[in-house]
Image: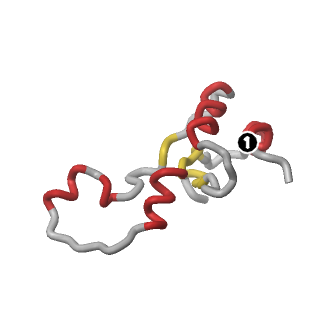
Amino acid sequence: SSFCFTMIVNPKSGVDRGRVLQRLREAEIEHRIITGGNFLRHDVIKYFDYEVTRSSNADIAHDYGFFVGNHPIDIRAEIDYLHKTLKDIAPTR
């Protein structure tokens, strides 16, 4: 299985990623922003000769993405807890 569960807050949802990450901290759920995000927005890019016209999907991952770790053992209880935590801050439909 993958080493993590990658998630992207829908930009149209009205949910603020900062609020989501704060709630995860409060719930003691370890998380990270998506590794690298949009590479074009990092300082290292000045060392490369490149030309890119758009990177809108990378920008979405950079601004709205995060991940929660996975584990090779059974973590169903932790996944249920993550789901409940996220559900508590998501708008109802």
Numbered disc total? 1
On the image, the x and y values in percent for residue 91 come to: 78, 46
Q: Image height check: is 83 above or below 52? A: above
Camera-nearest residue between 77 and 61? 61
- 33 and 75: which is toward the camera: 33
Determine the residue positioned at 62% across, 49% down: 72
- Residue that numbered label 1 is attached to: 86
Residue 29 at x, y percent in the picture: 63, 33
89 versus 3 height, above or below? above
Q: Amino acid at mark 1?
A: Leu
Secondary structure under the numbered disc 1 in the rendered image: helix
The quadrant where residue 83 appears: top right
Quarter of the image with the C terminus is: bottom right
- Colour scheme of the rendered structure: secondary structure
Tell me the quarter of the picture where residue 20 sits.
top right
Residue 40, given in percent of the width and then of the height, sits at 30, 60
Between residue 41 and residue 69, name the one nearer to us.
Answer: 41
How many other residues sit within 10 Å of disc 1, few (<14), some (14-19) or many (≥20)?
some
- Residue at left 57%, top 34%? 30
The correct choice, above or below, for 87 with respect to 52 in the image is: above
Quarter that holds the N terminus: bottom right
Looking at the image, residue 21 sits to the left or right of residue 61; the answer is right
Which residue is rendered at x = 54% and y = 51% of the image? 64
Nearest the camera: 70 or 46? 46
Left or right of 44? Residue 85 is right
Identify which residue is drawn at 64% across, 27% down: 28
